[in-house]
Image (tube, rainbow, N blue to C red):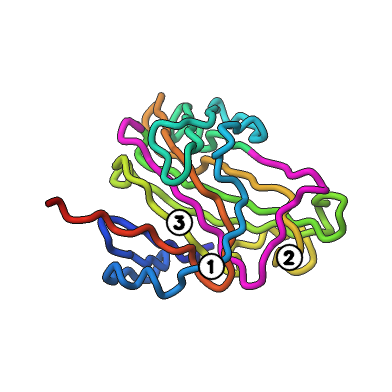
C-alpha cells in the first residue's frame, strides 16, 4: 500500500509539505502560522529526564536501546536518544519500543487529531535507508487496548542517508490518514490512547549497520499541525 501520510518538514525557516508518493512544494516561513495550535496534548516530551516507561524489544538479529538525554533537546530539557544495530538488509526489522499508559492515565485523543513529533537522524548512522513506523492503539472502555475489538493505526515515514543530517525535523500528520492495522471495528482511533509503538523497519544497508535516531516532543493537536518553531535569526 502506498503511504499517503502528510509529512511536514521545517528546515531553515521553510516548510516542505510532502504528500508521500504524490507531490512536494515549499512555502515561506510565514506559512507556519496557518495551523498554529493553541492547545497541545503532550504524549511524551521526555522533560522528566526518564524514559524508563518505554520498553524496547528486539528485531531480526537486531535490536536497540536508549534513554532520555539533555545535550541538545528540540524543546524543553530532554529528548529521547536511541540507537539500533543489525545486519542491514538481511535483518530488515531492527526492533522497536513501546509505551503503555496506565488505564487511569491514558491520553485523551482530541477531535480531528494530528500526531506531531520531532526526529533527529544522526549523521553517524550507517544504514542506507529505513522506515520509522509509529503505531497508536486506542482504548474505548478503560480496560486497555484489546485486539479484535479496538483499533490500531500506523504512520510510516521513510528515511534515506540523505536525511541523516544532524537536524531536528518536525513530522506531523492527521491520524485520519494513518494506515488501518485492522485490529478493530472501523480503523479509526478515538476516546483514549492506550499505547504508542515505535518500530525501525524495512532497513536496507550493509551487515552490520546502524540507525541513530532521536525523538522529542510527541504530541496531539486538533485541526492541524503543531505550530512550527521560529526560524533562526539572521546573524548580525
Residue 42, percent from left and from top: 60, 53
Instruction: Tell me what residue is drawn at x 49 percent, y 36 percent.
Output: 78
Q: Nearer the viewer, residue 230 or 60?
A: 230
Q: Is residue 109 magenta?
A: yes
Query: Mark number for residue 171?
Result: 3
> Please, what secondary structure does the residue beneath circle 3 have?
strand
> Please, what secondary structure does the residue beneath circle 1 have?
loop
Give the answer, above or below, for where 8 lies relative to 224.
Answer: above
Q: CA distance from mark 2 to mark 3?
A: 21 Å
Give the image quarter of residue 59: top right
Judge left or right: residue 138 versus residue 222.
right
Give the image quarter of residue 67: top right
Q: Is residue 200 visible?
A: yes
Q: Earlier in the sequence, mark 1 or mark 2?
A: 1
Which corner quadrant holds the N terminus?
Answer: bottom right
Residue 196, percent from left and from top: 65, 47
Query: Mark number for residue 96?
Result: none
Q: Earlier in the sequence, mark 2 or mark 3?
A: 3
Instruction: Tell me what residue is drawn at x 86 percent, y 54 percent.
Output: 142
- What are the residue bounds of the magenta stretch? 98-125
Instruction: Tell me what residue is drawn at x 61 percent, y 37 percent.
Output: 97
Q: Are marks 3 and 1 in contact (CB under 8 Å)?
A: no
Numbered disc in front, either 1 or 2: 1
Read off the residue under disc 2.
Answer: 190
Q: CA distance from mark 1 to mark 2?
A: 21 Å
Instruction: Tell me what residue is drawn at x 54 percent, y 37 percent.
Output: 93
Q: Is residue 3 visible?
A: no
Q: Are marks 1 and 2 in contact (CB under 8 Å)?
A: no
The count of marks equals 3
Read off the residue under disc 1.
Answer: 38
Q: CA distance from mark 3 to mark 1?
A: 18 Å
Amino acid at each position: 500500500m502506498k503511504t499517503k501520510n502528510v509529512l511536514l518538514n521545517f528546515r531553515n525557516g521553510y516548510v516542505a509539505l510532502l504528500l508521500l508518493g504524490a507531490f512536494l512544494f515549499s512555502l515561506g516561513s510565514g506559512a507556519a502560522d496557518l495551523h498554529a495550535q493553541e492547545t497541545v496534548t503532550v504524549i511524551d516530551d521526555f522533560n522528566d529526564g526518564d524514559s524508563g516507561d518505554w520498553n524496547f524489544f528486539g528485531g531480526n538479529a537486531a535490536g536497540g536501546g536508549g534513554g532520555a538525554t539533555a545535550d541538545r533537546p528540540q524543546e524543553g530539557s530532554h529528548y529521547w536518544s536511541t540507537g539500533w544495530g543489525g545486519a542491514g538488509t538481511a535483518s530488515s526489522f531492527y526492533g522497536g519500543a513501546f509505551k503503555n499508559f496506565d488505564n487511569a492515565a491514558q491520553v485523551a485523543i482530541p477531535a480531528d487529531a494530528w500526531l506531531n513529533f520531532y526526529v533527529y537522524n544522526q549523521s553517524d548512522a550507517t544504514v542506507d535507508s529505513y522506515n520509522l513506523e509509529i503505531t497508536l492503539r486506542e482504548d474505548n472502555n478503560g480496560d486497555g487496548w484489546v485486539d479484535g475489538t479496538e483499533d490500531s493505526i500506523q504512520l510510516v515515514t521513510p528515511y534515506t542517508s540523505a536525511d541523516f543530517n544532524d537536524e531536528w525535523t518536525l513530522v506531523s500528520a492527521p491520524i485520519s490518514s494513518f494506515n488501518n492495522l485492522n485490529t478493530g471495528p472501523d480503523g479509526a482511533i478515538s476516546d483514549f490512547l492506550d499505547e504508542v509503538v515505535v518500530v525501525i523497519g524495512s532497513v536496507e544497508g550493509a551487515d552490520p549497520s546502524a540507525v541513530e535516531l532521536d525523538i522529542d516532543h510527541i504530541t496531539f493537536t486538533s485541526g492541524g499541525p503543531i505550530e512550527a518553531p521560529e526560524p533562526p535569526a539572521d546573524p548580525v
